[in-house]
Image (spheres, grey):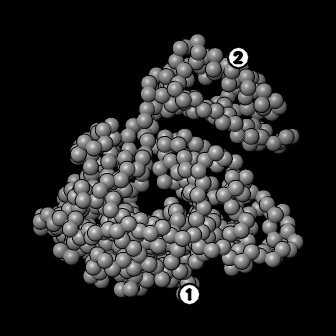
Amino acid sequence: MKEMLTGGEAPLDVLTGDYLAELTMLILGRDRLKDPARGYARTFLRQLEECLGLARERGTRIVTNAGGLNPAGLAERIRELADRLGIPVRVGHVEGDDLLATGRFPGALTANAYLGGAGIAACLEAGAEIVVTGRVTDAALVSGPAAWHFGWTPDAYDRHAGAVVAGHVLECGTQATGGNYSRFAEHAAGLFLRPGFPLAEIHEDGSAVITKHPGTGGLVDVGTVTAQLLYETGGARYAGPDVTVRLDTVRLERQGPDRVRIHGVRGEAPPPTLKTGLNRLGGFRNEVVFVLTGLDIDRKAELVRAQMDAAFDAAGARPEHVRWELARTDRPDAPTEETASALLRLVVRDQDQDAVGRALSGAAVELALGSYPGFHVTAPPGRGAPYGVFEAAYVDRAEVPHVAVLPDGTRRDVSAYAHPTLPLAPVAQPALPEPPPPGPVRRAPLGRVVGARSGDKGGDANIGVWAHTEDAWPWLAHTLTVERLRELLPETAGLTVTRHLLPNLRALNFTVEGLLGEGVAAQARFDPQAKGLGEWLRSRHLDLPEALL
């Protein structure tokens, strides 16, 4: 926060901060169970204590969703902090997203609709210097201030869409400036040591330039912006509460060092429903990782699995869900013990904590002197921890209040800003480019010619893949079909995979349904948020045209 306020030649108009993710909402929900006065991101207050004076001095407004499940509570804490520091500040907040009290979602720990930017705009219009929200879309932290600054009407769809795209690029911070970038190895080693944070220069027509403060690390180029645009999106339409963005219209243009212009973005009416994120406690989980060293790895794994199964049966406490995964990290004739070892991971889940606690730890520890040679585990299992389950529901937007609480305490219902929505005609799949001419090929990793970025949405995963060059795009579009993806990533076999073409970005976006089970909090998979899925895909070998290499 301090870096963003003090860097650059001119002060920021608005500083935004995104503190919420699906998993964060679960954590805040458990916080609220312990103390109803909590439910917000306390990290924000610690940052603000250092930076409130700086923001006031520079005339920078702050907009954040750190309010989480209790935006009113955080707004009050900010006022108390400002009084203690002797810095007068006008604070507004946005509420209405929390639907838990409606009783519509029995058994849920949290139930929050994703609101748009209208409440933020109303607070800023009323003179708020800090605006705190609960669950708004990540991009609303940018599109709301843009709508306020330029006075856009709700039906200025193209302008709103441009701001939403800018907000989507900014929402993950340094991932737009080279963090987690699949092409990092093509640049100097020290460039990404500490990437700077991105900023957007937004124009009245909705176009924007993504850049960063001079002298900060990392880089902004078409690749880093493309990577972030493909993150956690799907097809041509990206629906939100204020506008439906047509991602197939987005155009990127390098404008200079660390400057990428986003333009041409078209928008359509938003859907009649609002996405609502639900978190519930799913039960208890535990795990133990057995280390298998040297020879006969498969036989060792077979022995310990049979022993654990027998122990569960003898105890009469077999967990409801039992999952084994063998990671063959071992190498023959290895120079170190670690590289001679494989990891056998056992994950158990059950509604009963004892079934994943004492039953698992007792069986695992009692095997220590009577199992495979070299028996040891990475850490002894504990009592078992609660896990969460995320799912998305959709609620008629007319049933969700959207209230801006202005700095003077006035409550303004901005639900009326919502406009009638019409069914949108299906988007035609764009035509494939002309196939590339045949030529010599060489076996090599796919990542030699494409970048990738992957992530999670509940139990689904998405993988965005883009061609490094114009010449590589026709090859990518014709080669990386759904069938080929399933061959390269066997874990996707049997799951519904949908491919979307985005020719303006030279990109494909794949949605893999159900790969992540019940979402990140359930920890059902080795990589529960699919962060490495794109890098696994890039590492797979296939025949690449020599002309592209």
Circles 1 and 2: CB atoms closer than 8 Å: no
Closer-to-camera residue (421/61)? 421
The quarter holding residue 471 reads: bottom right
Residue drawn at point x = 19 percent, y = 69 percent: 90
Closer-to-camera residue (466/149)? 466
The quarter holding residue 244 reads: bottom left
Q: Is residue 195 above or below residue 323?
A: below
Left or right: 535 in relation to 233? right
- Look at mark 1 in the image and give the residue it sits on: 256
Left or right: 274 in relation to 170? left
Residue drawn at point x = 68 percent, y = 24 percent: 305
Closer-to-camera residue (174/404)? 404
Q: Position of residue 180 (x, y in %)?
A: 58, 63
Q: Position of residue 494 (x, y in %)?
A: 64, 45
Left or right: 216 in relation to 269? right
Q: Position of residue 186 (x, y in %)?
A: 70, 72
Q: Position of residue 349 (x, y in %)?
A: 51, 31
Amino acid type at circle 2 is Gly
- Secondary structure state at the residue bearing disc 2: loop
Q: How many numbered marks does the figure carry?
A: 2
Amino acid type at circle 1 is Gly
Say which of marks 1 and 2 sits in front: 1
Please say whether residue 40 is visible from this viewpoint.
no
